[in-house]
Image (tube, rainbow, N blue to C red):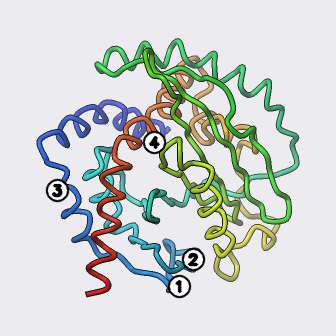
Amino acid sequence: MKMLAKWIIAIALCATHAVGLAARTDEEIRDGIAALGWKHGPTSTPVGAAANLVVPKDTAFLADTEGAKFLELTGNLPQPGNAILMGGTWWATLTFQDVGYVKDDETIDADALLKDLKEQDAPANEERRKLGLPELHTDGWYVPPHYDPQTKHLEWGLRLKTPGEAEPTINYTVRLLGRKGYEAVTLVSSPERLDADVKELKAILASFTFNAGESYDEFKPGDHVAEFGLAALVAGGAAAAAAKSGLWKVILGFLAASWKLVAAGAVAVVAGAAKLLGRKKDS
């Protein structure tokens, strides 16, 4: 329930930080992003305390110690524990969720899962209206959830729409399963670049490895096992397991829908910052 309480607080603060960004110019935001402690590829870098990633050329990585600063600059809630991976036209958050070993022995029913997500729209939008945020509706799968038993990666793409919006927002997500939890990766991209950016991100994630003793296949009897499986990871993971009353639909629906909407507006600014980072590296 502690995790649930933190997420309730996050909901209450989300609108405040989005408003604060409006006082800054695009140039100020780009300069602020470029001033952070980026590691430029090609390089290899730790991701948190349990994993490693190869960062290729023309890509930059920001450790989770400074990820909150980046999130605040892009109009998002500055949540701690998020590392940032930046390409030329996209960026992604990486954060480890220490929830225990998630069993991968269930079959995902994409149609049933989509129905559940759509049923969350009404209570979630009630909360969004209270916060002065536009409604957001589940439009369907961009990529249905699917799990690769070889890589232990679960990924999906969800189309989300706001009233009056011509094009849907795509929330593209990857979960990389480990022995003690999973690495949560959320991609932020523009609709016209999404397919190419997803391909680029997945190529980089192929180099993601958990440290010795932390990989999924190194599970040992007695390890903590998560109270939910693959389907719940798509529907919100720990929140769905922690709150078994009607309240979880409000919280879970809001969180699943709000993150990308706030983040997507910063893609163009971040692309400009990526160019600035490239010039600084060359000089």
Dots 1 and 2: beta carbons under 8 Å? Answer: yes
Disc 2 or disc 4, which is closer to the eye? 2
Disc 2 or disc 3, which is closer to the eye? 3
Q: CA distance from mark 2 to mark 3?
A: 30 Å
Lateral position of residue 155 relative to residue 186, left or right: right
In percent of width and height, residue 249 lies at 56, 22
Q: Amino acid at mark 2?
A: Leu
Lateral position of residue 212 relative to residue 197, left or right: right
Q: Within 10 angstroms of label 1, few (less than 14), some, or many (20 or more) residues? A: some
Dots 4 and 1: beta carbons under 8 Å? Answer: no
Q: CA distance from mark 1 to mark 2?
A: 6 Å
| Residue under the point 44% across and 39% down | 259
Single out the residue that lies furthest toward the left. Answer: 23
Q: Amino acid at mark 3?
A: Glu
The numbered disc on residue 27 is 3
Q: Which residue is mark 1?
A: 44
Q: Amino acid at mark 4?
A: Lys
